[in-house]
Amino acid sequence: MELSALAARLRRLEDLEALRRLKADYCELCDRGAAGSEIAALFTEDAELALLPDGGRARGHAEIAAFYARLDGRFARGAHLLANPRLEVEGDRATGRWWMLLLAEDTRAEPPAERRLLAEYREHYQRVDGAWRISRLAVHGARWLEGRA
């Protein structure tokens, strides 16, 4: 195998691992109720957040930070569980799909209630100054699961 082909394969593997780490960082920040600005820092400056079909949109760091700030600890003791990642890398751009199950306590419910949310993340990523960032995060098919599993 030529050295250039080996270097390209290594770069792809490193990119895939960096994208997995980016998603893990995003989930960890959300789960611990990090500041909206801390979460927004994982996105590109012109990124879009879309909760489809009608859960709202935010564009750019300021709007994305404000979106997460509005959650303000609503889902206490949250845990994102991700499955079935599909990641495709092409140069400095990539796409990803993940199934997500969120387990959390909804502190705004009266009385507070345990919630389970199932959804699919569909994302676009861009390498900015050598680091991967989320350029579009869309949540599809979000639905609250009722009853016992």
Image (spheres, rainbow, N blue to C red):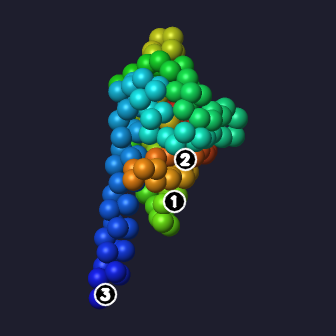
The amino acid type found where label 1 is placed reads: Arg
Q: On the rendered structure, is 135 left or right of 2?
A: right
Q: Residue at x 34, y 80 (%)?
A: 4
Q: Which mark is residue 127?
A: none
Q: Which mark is residue 135?
A: 2
Q: Quadrant of residue 32?
A: top left
Label 2, residues with CA under 10 Å away: few <14, some 14-19, many ≥20? many
Q: Are marks 2 and 3 in contact (CB under 8 Å)?
A: no
Which residue lies under the disc numbered 3?
Answer: 2
The amino acid type found where label 3 is placed reads: Glu
Measured in 3D between alpha carbons, the distance from the residue under mark 1 to the one under mark 3, in whole angstroms, is: 25 Å
User: N-terminal of the two: label 1 or label 2?
Assistant: 1
User: N-terminal of the two: label 2 or label 3?
Assistant: 3
Label 3: which secondary element = loop
State whether residue 136 appears in this view: yes
The amino acid type found where label 2 is placed reads: Ser
State whether residue 116 appears in this view: no
Q: Are marks 1 and 2 in contact (CB under 8 Å)?
A: yes
Which residue lies under the disc numbered 1?
Answer: 93
Q: Position of residue 123 (x, y in %)?
A: 54, 50
Q: Position of residue 68 (x, y in %)?
A: 51, 26
Label 2: which secondary element = strand
Q: Residue at x 37, y 60 (%)?
A: 15
Q: Position of residue 1 (x, y in %)?
A: 29, 88
> In the image shown, does 59 or 122 lie closer to the viewer?
59
